[in-house]
Image (cartoon, rainbow, N blue to C red):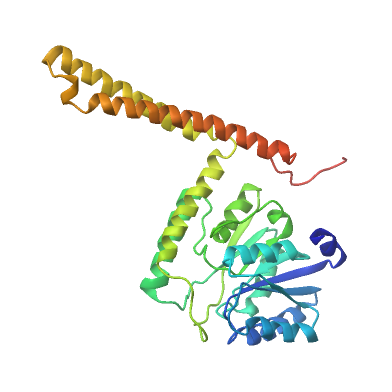
Amino acid sequence: MVEQERAEHRVDLTVIVPVYNEAGSIGDLLARTLVELERLGKNFEIIVVDDGSRDTSAEIVEGLASSDRRIRLLRLRRNFGQTAALMAGFDHASGDILIPMDGDGQNDPSDIPALLAKLEQGYDVVSGWRHDRKDAEFGRRLPSRLANRLISWSTGVVLNDYGCTLKAYRRDVLSDVRLYGEMHRFIPVYASWQGARITEMPVRHHPRRHGQSSYGLERTAKILLDLMVVLFLERYAVKPIYVFGTIGIASVVLSLIAGAVALALKIFWGVYLITTPLPLAAVFLFLAGLIAILSGLLAEMIMRTYHESQAKPPYAIKSKINF
């Protein structure tokens, strides 16, 4: 049904704005966004995803949508988080180009034309970089810088600001992307797996004038855990036995070494096996290694079921000629 509605209401550009308790800023933000989009001379829509707001955010957007059909409102049943809200916006967007943007007014709609100009240079993803970020240094900016460097180093997709919501995507690079947890910041990584050309450009960033940010230092731990998932999916999703098998073999080898040392102590130095923890360690390491290997085989079966049940090939085609 969503695909049918999308085909019937095809537009050039979709701006997606996730909102959670932003009654003080959303009205002004939408007004400024409309002005910038109308200057472009393109068919557009603005999808506001209300992520279970407890204030009047949804009512404000509903009032604006009643007088301008280009503003669309999705109301989620409860607060699912920014990633889920963005995924809902992507699923219901009709545009060939998708631009997510924060609803707190810190992103500037006047940067949208520059993002589109970058796309026209042949890029598939243009990521915003808040080079003059107006947030607290130790609470937000320092952890963000460390996370950006870690993500860039570990994934090979080098960006200065993964956390900036303001980005521009061609629809085709998001066609197979499914987001969970706090994964929205890793969308450029997912796009790079599809062979997307990615660039970054500085964008404006304004101080928050209304409300309070729902993110704190605890988000850093979530980012690190999500990064582990991304790295696993990137390197081992198709062959999970490689990571499970490597851990399993290493554990079995360690168990054999521990057992050999225990026997050597008994034979050459007369140390009774019961007086050393090495035999117990050998048994536990061997069992752990066996479980890891069996888990890898099970993961291989699950991976094949995933691809075959959806007729989903383990590759992505960019284009076809004469088919």
The residue lying furthest to the front in this view is 274
* 189 or 23: nearer the viewer: 23
Where is residue 124? Give x, y as percent.
Answer: 68, 58
Q: How many numbered marks appear?
A: 0
| Relative to 164, residue 196 above or below | above
Seen from the viewer's position, the closer of residues 6 and 174 is 6
Quadrant in the picture for residue 26: bottom right
Residue 86: image location, x then y, percent: 64, 65
Report x, y in % for residue 196: 65, 52
- Residue positioned 55% across, 61% down in the render: 185
Left or right relative to 308: residue 111: left
Res. 48 in view: yes
Is residue 250 among the parts visible in the rendering? no
Between 302 and 28, the residue placed more toward the observer is 302
Front residue of this view, candidates 136 and 59: 59
| 233 sits left or right of 292 in the view | right
Q: Is residue 205 above or below residue 260?
A: below
| Among the 4 quarters of the image, the one containing residue 298 | top right
Residue plotted at (16% across, 12% down): 267
Residue 9 in picture, x, y percent from top left: 85, 68
Give the answer, above or below, for where 240 lies relative to 223: above
Q: Residue furthest top?
A: 267
Residue shown at 55% from the left, 58% from the top: 181
Q: Quadrant of the C terminus?
A: top right
Asked which quadrant contains residue 220, the reply is bottom left
Q: Quadrant of the N terminus?
A: bottom right
